[in-house]
Image (tube, rainbow, N blue to C red):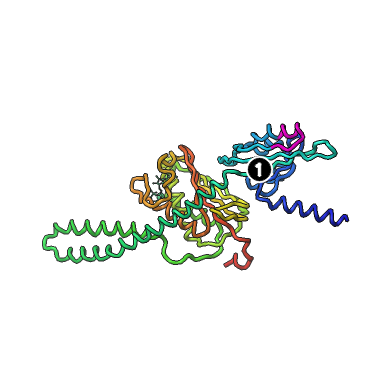
Amino acid sequence: MAVRVWSSKIQAQRIVENLSTAVLLLGEDLCVRHLNPAAEALFEISTRQAQGLVLGAALPGAGVLVSILHQAAAGARAYTERGVEVRLPPDRSITVDCTVTPLSDSGKTRSLLLEIVQVDLPLRIAREESLIAQNQATRTLTRGLAHEIKNPLGGLRGAAQLLERELPDPALQEYTRIIIGEADRLQALVDRMLGPNGPPRTGPVNIHEVVEHVRGLIEAESPAGVRIVRDYDPSIPPLAGDRDQLVQALLNIVRNALQAVGERGTILLRTRADRQLTIGARRHKLVARIEVVDDGPGIPAGMQESIFYPLITAREGGTGLGLSIAQSLVSHHGGLIECTSRPGHTEFTLLLPLPLPLPPESRDE
Ligand SMILES: Nc1ncnc2c1ncn2[C@@H]1O[C@H](COP(=O)(O)OP(=O)(O)OP(=O)(O)O)[C@@H](O)[C@H]1O
Ligand SMILES: [Mg+2]
């Protein structure tokens, strides 16, 4: 009998630990007792860090839930509040439905069970799915277009070179040089439109090696007034991917941040691991998050929806290809790039699903 009680307790615990819904257990005094992994991931805090602290102190963004908890405790019955806006670290807010259930022991309330369900998630999934589909469609279109331009371009340049040699008056060479120069410029543009060539070389990738490599390249380009701050989660395991493609994707984003801040500003490179995160319609157990935050002027308001399309640029001399290439490289890895921006705070987030931990021998390759 004792064995059966023990195993059903373990089973209940396993169910709670594997739920994608955030579940918190609080004392009557509203002190945190336990968070399931989904709650830890949502609020970016471990049970160990939160335990014993009152809810408002442990999770400042969830302070709005305090009055709901009090009402449930006072009424000693389950209480649900819909459409509550909760702030999440570092600077996000989500809409949730929460249910508080007082757990009583012989009629006396002992603890409160708080369930939090994110309700803006289906909306986000639909948006992400359409973003991925749109990106694939536009990439196919631009690649097709680039191929069509590339073919006659070589002939055009070759003919201009031949013509240059035949010209009787050297002064006329100014015109052939313009043709050759512009053909070279177009060639560079279509090469970028075609993106990296060759099949992806998939292997174990250490995300921090990628971020540090990009940081080194950007540091070398940065004016003295630009500060690059790092905030890494060293526990992120390696992912399976093409290291050079991920460097390219991240470099495009960090270079944009550098161009946005100009002579003076701060760029933050942050890495985190998210559990049970959906990208498009797929739910992943573990996802690496690389955030690039800058304090530049932000993306112009009318442009925010279209920045991932090719040839969209607000920068003098920009080709508008950097983000579309980055999005397509990341989507080859099953991931997604998200962006939020307001003046003084622009945040690009690369989400990359992580496979189950790699066997030790493949990590050393
Ligand atoms: N961190 C940022 N802050 C402000 N605006 C940004 C930021 N990142 C991107 N943008 C805007 O998005 C546009 C598109 O960026 P994208 O990298 O695709 O092209 P680009 O930088 O203009 O040209 P390139 O192809 O050389 O990268 C930029 O022109 C800029 O207006
Ligand atoms: Mg760019």
The residue beneath circle 1 is 116
* In the rendered image, the vertical position of residue 115 relative to residue 241, given as above or below: above
237 left or right, relative to 247:
right
101 left or right, relative to 281:
right
Image spot of residue 279 (x, y percent): 55, 53
| In front of the other: 52 or 69 | 69
Q: In terms of image quadrants, where is residue 165? A: bottom left
| Span of residues in magenta | 69-79
Give the residue type that dot 1 points to: Ile
Does mark 1's beta carbon lie closer than 8 Å to ligand 1? no
55 left or right, relative to 210:
right
Query: Is residue 72 shown in magenta?
Result: yes
Q: Main secondary structure of the magenta part?
A: helix
Q: In terms of image quadrants, where is residue 326? A: bottom left
Image spot of residue 112 (x, y percent): 75, 39
Secondary element type, mark 1: strand
Dividing the image into 4 quarters, which one contains the C terminus? bottom right
Query: Is residue 47 shown in magenta?
Result: no
Image spot of residue 146 (x, y percent): 34, 60
| In front of the other: 129 or 305 | 129
